[in-house]
Image (tube, coloured by chain):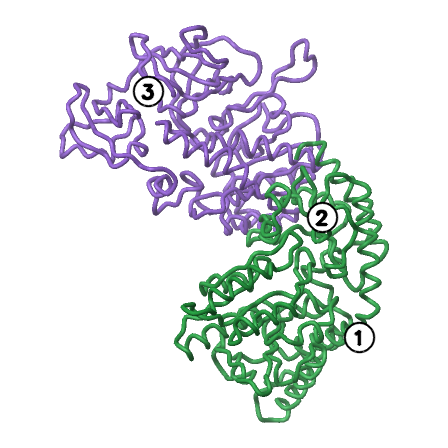
Chain colours: A green, B purple
């Protein structure tokens, strides 16, 4: 029986072209790209090619790309790197601000630095009035100043897309000294990041969310012509790699594979988005029509309007069940899915995203995230439509 | 007597705490040809280092499952644990009771929530690493061929855990398995060592799993309820000292009572929670002829005494009879244990378990005590 992999928001299968790029490089291009000899130069050539490809995929210049060991590092570097630099250079206790539905890779450093977490609406979008109020309070007279505002492009649990343009506009008006960062880790497959995040000052991506390997990511740090250049304090101090922004020898083969995956992803996007959106719609409609007591997040009640979400996410909350039991039954049917985020022990924790959207705890405990990917098929969708309603009914009947 | 309920051989879910007993329980079932899946319960998210649900314990359970080649899952029962174990534990301390959280965890989490979850997921039975056995008697009409199941003491007397399983009824027992119950702890460790399991030499868990060993009960309760100072008086009523918190005094306690260098050993022999007064006295002042029990439940039909009655996890049982009726209290399950010889008072909230030989026949929770004259000394609020 084939496995139905519907957990692409957690991680994606490595694209064959990325794998074919990466594995030989491990054997042939092991030179240290910072070195001076021919083998070092060969490795550096691979890195420069990858930097150009990533820049093209993200709508950035090659010099703006900082390679990292993944999305979490990119997010941490954006928040902590900017906050530390602003505080050290201005002497003001400037704070970061983010939305309540950010990934913990943003949320936790923002909280750590004493920043503000801005509420979202029931639909999962940043409450712009709340953001305006926070900016005014922090950036206005007597405030500590705002170092950075970080709002994700698309949410990892619900797929809800944030109004980044309006957020940028608000920040430029209310706190012109603040930088804007966007966590685009979930976005590259489904949104034209180059266009949607063109106005953001910093942008994070993670290779394994778009068919690349784990442990590789990038942070775009814009050179802003005519404005003061953006300076980050590096998190990892060391050999001065990545223009002094990230010490440590680069993961040459992994970075090359990421670039191949990003290039393919961007090239396929115009056809992948409508194809996957249609599959997702059939999946969500199919489940909702077969079981009662279900709420589809990010979709106005009583409608099937999924225009506020990325094409790949079907996120449902079922009344009267617990996700971890549902996931167990789905796994028995070879359906790989997830609920909210998992903690270090592997236990399900209630989702802070759903809590921020106003879901009560019991309903949030019954969440199911089915996330499609570039290789999801009709058979995967059929399997989930066949299994999910039956599993939900079984759990409800057994009182667990 | 067998370690296993008779009959069915469907899939079994093994509750794996990350300790050696449940590791070996899984291994024994697997060797016996069962379809075994492991699960670790995440019960407590707060600070704790002595417990059964730390990340490192989950890692140990997962690694053992990997070594055995069985699936392993983690269920988050944190909300149930908070509601049924932690909250009542804290609440009981405000009422002068000393609850046994392991018993309540077994009652509400392991053998209720987990059994229901296992059923919903298609498991016939749940196994744990408890040192206890299942004893089956031939069934009597009208149940016919269905055997009567009871908890019996484990083979290792020093490690016996039948006491904390006293609440299990027939429906629960029919769906349980205790694979290490007929092994000694040394045998269990030897099996783990032979299989190369990483838990083979792991220390036994101690104390209450959600309480950190550094801050202890004082820090845990102090973060959650106001701790009230109390007077210490002697049996004649004269004030002899004080304690910082009456909530932290347990009936029968000797250590931690500041009596200003008294030569004679004195114990907390009575606690008047409302008046914030602890009476201290000689050990024999704790002795009573009778003991109240609340919520007494039989594992099957009531049986006649006398019983051997055990009042702490590894305590020595003492002979007693059981009296129901008006004198015992107004609620169903209220009863009075009448000791054959006077015994120390049991701190209210502790479990009282009735055995016939090695077999658990009933259990309940200690309530108000009856003094040698048969008069109620205190009443549970």
Q: Secondary structure at mark 1?
A: helix
The residue that disc 2 covers is A316
Contact (Cβ within 8 Å) of mark 3 with mark 2: no
Characterize the local packing of mark 2: few (<14), some (14-19) or many (20 or more) Cα atoms within 10 angstroms: many
The chain under label 3 reads B
Q: State the residue at coordinates (83%, 52%).
A: A282
In-front residue for pair B221/A85? A85
Q: State the residue at coordinates (53%, 75%).
A: A176
The residue that disc 3 covers is B345
The residue positioned farthest toward the bottom in the image shown: A37
The residue that disc 1 covers is A267
Same chain for the residues under marks 2 and 1 in the image:
yes
The chain under label 2 reads A
How much space separates mark 3 and mark 2, taking CA atoms? Answer: 55 Å
Q: Which of label 3 and label 2 is nearer to you?
A: 2
Question: As displayed, is residue A281 above or below residue B310?
Answer: below
């Amino acid at each position: 029986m084939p496995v139905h992999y519907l957990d692409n928001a957690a991680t994606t299968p490595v694209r064959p072209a990325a794998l074919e790029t990466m594995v030989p490089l491990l054997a042939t291009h092991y030179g240290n790209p910072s070195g001076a000899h021919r083998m070092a130069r060969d490795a550096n050539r691979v890195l420069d090619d990858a930097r150009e490809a990533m820049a093209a995929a993200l709508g950035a210049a090659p010099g703006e790309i900082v390679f990292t060991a993944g999305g979490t590092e990119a997010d941490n570097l954006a928040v902590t790197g900017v906050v530390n630099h602003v505080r050290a250079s201005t002497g003001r206790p400037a704070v970061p601000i983010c939305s309540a539905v950010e990934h913990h890779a943003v949320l936790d450093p923002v909280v750590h630095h004493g920043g503000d977490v801005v509420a979202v609406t029931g639909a999962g979008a940043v409450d712009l009035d709340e953001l305006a109020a926070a900016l005014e309070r922090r950036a206005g007279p007597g405030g500590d100043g705002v170092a950075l505002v970080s709002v994700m492009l698309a949410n990892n649990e619900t797929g809800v897309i944030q109004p980044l343009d309006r957020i940028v506009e608000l920040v430029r008006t209310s706190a012109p000294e603040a930088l804007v960062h966007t966590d685009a880790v979930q976005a590259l497959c489904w949104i034209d990041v180059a266009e949607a995040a063109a106005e953001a000052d910093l942008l994070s991506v993670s290779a394994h969310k778009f068919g690349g390997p784990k442990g590789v990511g990038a942070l775009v740090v814009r050179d802003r012509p005519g404005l003061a250049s953006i300076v980050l304090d590096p998190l990892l101090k060391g050999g001065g790699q990545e223009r002094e922004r990230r010490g440590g020898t680069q993961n040459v083969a992994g970075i090359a594979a990421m670039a191949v995956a990003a290039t393919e992803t961007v090239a396929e996007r115009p056809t992948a988005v409508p194809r996957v959106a249609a599959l997702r719609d059939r999946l969500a409609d199919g489940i909702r029509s077969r079981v009662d007591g279900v709420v589809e997040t990010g979709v106005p009640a009583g409608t099937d309007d999924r225009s506020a979400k990325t094409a790949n996410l079907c996120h449902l909350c079922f009344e009267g069940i617990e996700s971890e039991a549902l996931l167990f039954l789905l796994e028995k049917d070879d359906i790989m899915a997830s609920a909210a985020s998992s903690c270090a022990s592997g236990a399900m924790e209630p989702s802070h995203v759903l809590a921020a959207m106003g879901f009560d705890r019991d309903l949030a405990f019954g969440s199911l995230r089915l996330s499609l990917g570039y290789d999801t098929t009709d058979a995967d969708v059929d399997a989930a439509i066949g299994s999910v309603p039956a599993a939900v009914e079984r759990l409800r009947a057994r009182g667990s | 007597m067998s370690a296993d309920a008779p009959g069915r051989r469907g899939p079994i879910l093994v509750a794996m705490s990350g300790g050696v007993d449940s590791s070996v329980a899984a291994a024994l079932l697997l060797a016996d040809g069962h379809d075994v899946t492991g699960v670790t319960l995440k019960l407590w998210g707060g600070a704790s280092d002595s417990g059964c649900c730390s990340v490192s314990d989950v890692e140990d359970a997962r690694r053992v499952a990997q070594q055995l080649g069985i699936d392993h899952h983690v269920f988050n029962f944190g909300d149930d644990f908070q509601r049924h174990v932690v909250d009542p534990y804290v609440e009981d301390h405000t009422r002068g009771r000393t609850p046994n959280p392991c018993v309540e965890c077994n009652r509400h989490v392991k053998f209720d929530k987990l059994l229901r979850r296992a059923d919903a997921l298609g498991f016939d039975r749940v196994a744990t690493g408890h040192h206890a056995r299942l004893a089956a008697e031939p069934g009597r009409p009208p149940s016919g061929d269905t055997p009567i199941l009871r908890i019996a003491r484990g083979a290792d007397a020093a490690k016996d855990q039948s006491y904390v399983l006293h609440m299990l009824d027939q429906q629960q027992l029919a769906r349980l398995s205790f694979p290490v119950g007929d092994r000694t702890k040394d045998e269990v460790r030897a099996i783990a060592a032979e299989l190369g399991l990483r838990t083979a030499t792991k220390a036994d868990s101690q104390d209450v799993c959600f309480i950190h060993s550094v801050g202890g009960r004082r820090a845990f309760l102090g973060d959650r309820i106001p701790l009230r100072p109390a007077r210490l008086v002697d049996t004649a009523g004269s004030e002899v000292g004080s304690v910082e918190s009456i909530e932290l005094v347990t009936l029968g306690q000797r250590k931690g009572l500041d009596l200003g260098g008294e030569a004679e050993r004195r114990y907390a022999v009575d606690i008047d929670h409302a008046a914030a007064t602890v009476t201290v006295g000689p050990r024999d002042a704790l002795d009573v002829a009778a003991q109240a029990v609340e919520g007494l439940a039989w594992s099957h039909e009531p049986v006649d005494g006398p019983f051997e009655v055990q009042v702490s996890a590894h305590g020595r049982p003492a002979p007693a009879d059981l009296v129901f009726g008006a004198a015992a209290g107004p609620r169903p399950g209220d009863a009075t244990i009448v000791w054959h010889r006077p015994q120390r008072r049991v701190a209210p909230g502790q479990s009282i378990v009735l055995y016939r030989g090695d077999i658990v026949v009933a259990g309940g929770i200690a309530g108000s005590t009856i003094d040698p004259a048969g008069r109620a000394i205190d009443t549970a609020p």
